[in-house]
Image (cartoon, rainbow, N blue to C red):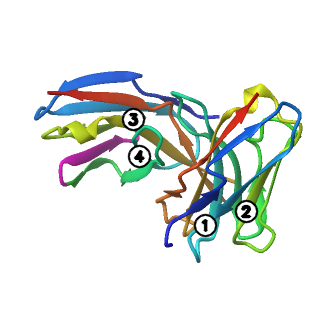
Amino acid sequence: GQNIDQPTEMTATEGAIVQINCTYQTSGFNGLFWYQQHAGEAPTFLSYNVLDGLEEKGRFSSFLSRSKGYSYLLLKELQMKDSASYLCAVRVVSGGSYIPTFGRGTSLIVHP
Amino acid sequence: GAGVSQSPRYKVAKRGQDVALRCDPISGHVSLFWYQQALGQGPEFLTYFQNEAQLDKSGLPSDRFFAERPEGSVSTLKIQRTQQEDSAVYLCASSLGGLAGELFFGEGSRLTVL
């Protein structure tokens, strides 16, 4: 099975930078995703890493180290609308299928 | 619409009733996933289809849960003899399949079992 660990809750100030960590233990690793989910809404895709290193997309960046089983999502210039749950998902290959498995999510609260 | 559509958005069932939840994926998407999300938790994998073939159903919590996708497009998740612990949001997601990674989620069906 997969073991995905991320903090339950984080708080940050508007305009600041926050880093949300995700660690995982799995076999058949085939990529790591970050999704954003506002309360009562569907998760939406933020980023995808399959190779080691940093992927930057506007205010959001995601980093992966496969050897350490570690990823982080970096959010810059925080805005109030960034208050949401951030889900780390690891995709594994099993019998020809590619199944994303999600962590429990990190609830980010941005305050003025 | 171009997105994943789920119905009903809200369902209240009495314990013991059967329910059926529908998912209409994005046209042309080969892969379809069902997840169960309890309040304050991440989505838990239930089952996976590649076209009409159900390739993985290891996440279905009991034999009361059944899913199908007979023509490789619309999928239905059926829960028989609902129990209170089945109360959750059921999310459907689709993707192009294979190594195409991004999942597109529907709004979910919120099931409340009384």
Label 1 environment density (alpha carbons within 10 Å; few <14, some 14–19, many ≥20): many
Neighbour class for label 4 at 10 Å: few (<14), some, many (≥20)? many
Please tell me which of labels 2 and 1 falls first in the chain: 1
Residue A15 located left or right of residue B46: left
Residue at image x 76%, y 58%?
B76
Residue type at mark 3 is Ser
Badge 1 is on which residue? B25
Spot occupied by residue B47 in the image (x, y as percentages of width and height): 72, 50
For disc 4, the marked residue is A35
The one nearer the camera, A22 or B43, is B43
Q: Are marks 2 and 1 in contact (CB under 8 Å)?
A: yes
Query: Disc 4 on helix, strand or loop?
Result: strand
Q: Nearer the viewer, mark 4 or mark 2?
A: 2
Residue type, mark 1 in image: Pro
Q: Tell me if residue A65 is in the magenta stretch.
A: yes
Disc 1 to disc 4, C-alpha distance: 19 Å
Tell me what residue is drawn at x 43 percent, y 39 percent: A88
Q: CA distance from mark 4 to mark 2?
A: 23 Å
Q: Chain of mark 3?
A: A
Q: Which residues are magenta?
A: A58-66
* Magenta stretch, overall SS: strand
- Residue corresponding to mark 3: A85
Residue B75 disc label: 2
Look at label 4 and name its amino acid. Answer: Tyr
Q: Are marks 3 and 4 on the same chain?
A: yes
